[in-house]
Image: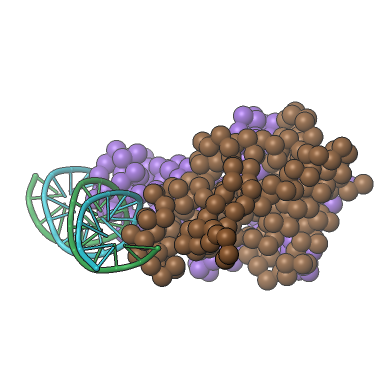
Chain colours: A purple, B brown, C cyan, D green
Amino acid sequence: MVVSEGERAEGPFGTLTRSRPQQRILAAALDLIGSHGVSGTSLQMIADAVGVTKAAVYHQYRSKNDIVIAVTENELAILQDALLAAEADERPEEARRTLLIQLIDLAVTRRQWVGTLTSDPVIVRILGEHPPFLQFMRRLYGVLLDQRDDTKARVSAAIMSAAIAGSVVNPLVADVDDDVLRATLIELVPRLMGLDG
Amino acid sequence: MVVSEGERAEGPFGTLTRSRPQQRILAAALDLIGSHGVSGTSLQMIADAVGVTKAAVYHQYRSKNDIVIAVTENELAILQDALLAAEADERPEEARRTLLIQLIDLAVTRRQWVGTLTSDPVIVRILGEHPPFLQFMRRLYGVLLDQRDDTKARVSAAIMSAAIAGSVVNPLVADVDDDVLRATLIELVPRLMGLDG
DNA sequence: GTCTATATGACGATAGAC
DNA sequence: GTCTATCGTCATATAGAC
């Protein structure tokens, strides 16, 4: 608390600076959106969760949309290091496998949110409309596809990302331990891409 | 149009009878919910799409929730024949593979909706609260798991259903033909369960 | 930075005429 | 079966005091 109260993070979308009130709002929004979706989450719910009024929330963010974008930025920023490392790796198969494992780890430890990130209609629309997000996703898939861009590779990548993001929220695995789920996914998912042998 | 204006369908949830106005409402709701999610779809949007007022919609269905349930019933009913055939088959591996292919076919031909069915928070809640839905899903997974219920089998089933339902809505495959997508999925997905050799 | 209070509109749902 | 009109509630968002 010596220099600054804000928290900085270098993300793929410029430097993300969040004041402490902003951090609390984004944490509450992440949790609520993860379980109710964007359209099912109101600013009143977020304000209640933080313990302030709606007006206080609006003092930090100009609109609900801005909150959704900030939350999405935060989460994608987590992947930044993993992506940079994969892009720097000269062994493409190794890079893909490592990135895959980190994607699995993120999905398992943040189960609910990851499902929302990849399927909520509002977030999908935002991801498709914001150039920084689009470019980040392109880089991500670039590594997974290893520059190939035929139909089969694209379908494979779609299957893989869906398998990771969707399986972790399935009620069937709700009571499976994070560690066990992660290990099982790491064993099974690479089979899809022929990365296991 | 001689005997009845309603359309009957034997579903896993009793006999589904829909009058013609109801069919139009459910068709519009299916389309809108598929692209905006349940919370993002208002009764006004549904009424506008049908070309009537909200009050006319309420004359057919008592609540928005009832519409969502009816739409979900309709879609799951499509799977009924496939499930019955699979349950009657005495060769479990063959039964699983056939059911899997029909699931893939349904997902491909109704891409948007299937994503919503498996991930929309409201629908997931309804699926978990309505005993007929719960029982149907249990039967479905029963065939896919072949009665096994260890962690690995459950994770496998979760991966598979996520891979099918989630991959078809990925922007990466948005411009892939239904036929090509179906063929590629049928080739790749069974690898997950070791059903390909 | 947070509050009370409010503007404006959309929401789900209902009443009653035709 | 569809309409107009309306209810009460909640939505996003803003103004201005402390």
Query: Which residue is pictured at 57% across the width and 57% down the height?
Result: B7
Q: Is residue B6 visible?
A: yes
For image coordinates 65% across by 67% down, the residue present is B174
Which residue is nearer to you in this view: B108 or A46? B108
Which one is in front, B59 or B120?
B59
> In the shown orientation, is residue D12 left or right of residue B70?
left
The one nearer the camera, A48 or B56, is B56
Tell which of C13 and B31 is nearer to you.
C13
Q: Can you tell which quarter of the image residue B168 is in? A: bottom right
Q: Residue B11 placed where, x, y %? A: 63, 46
Outermost residue, right side = B197
Position of B12 with respect to A98 (left or right) is left
Query: In the image, is residue A195 above or below residue B93?
Result: below
Residue A30 seen by the camera: no
Q: Position of residue B54 (x, y in %)?
A: 35, 61
Identify whether A190 is placed above or below B107.
above
Residue B188, image x and y in percent?
81, 54
- Quarter that holds the N terminus of chain B: bottom right
Residue drawn at (48%, 46%) of the image = B122
Q: How many marks?
A: 0
In the rendering, at what x and y percent does residue A46 appear?
Answer: 35, 44
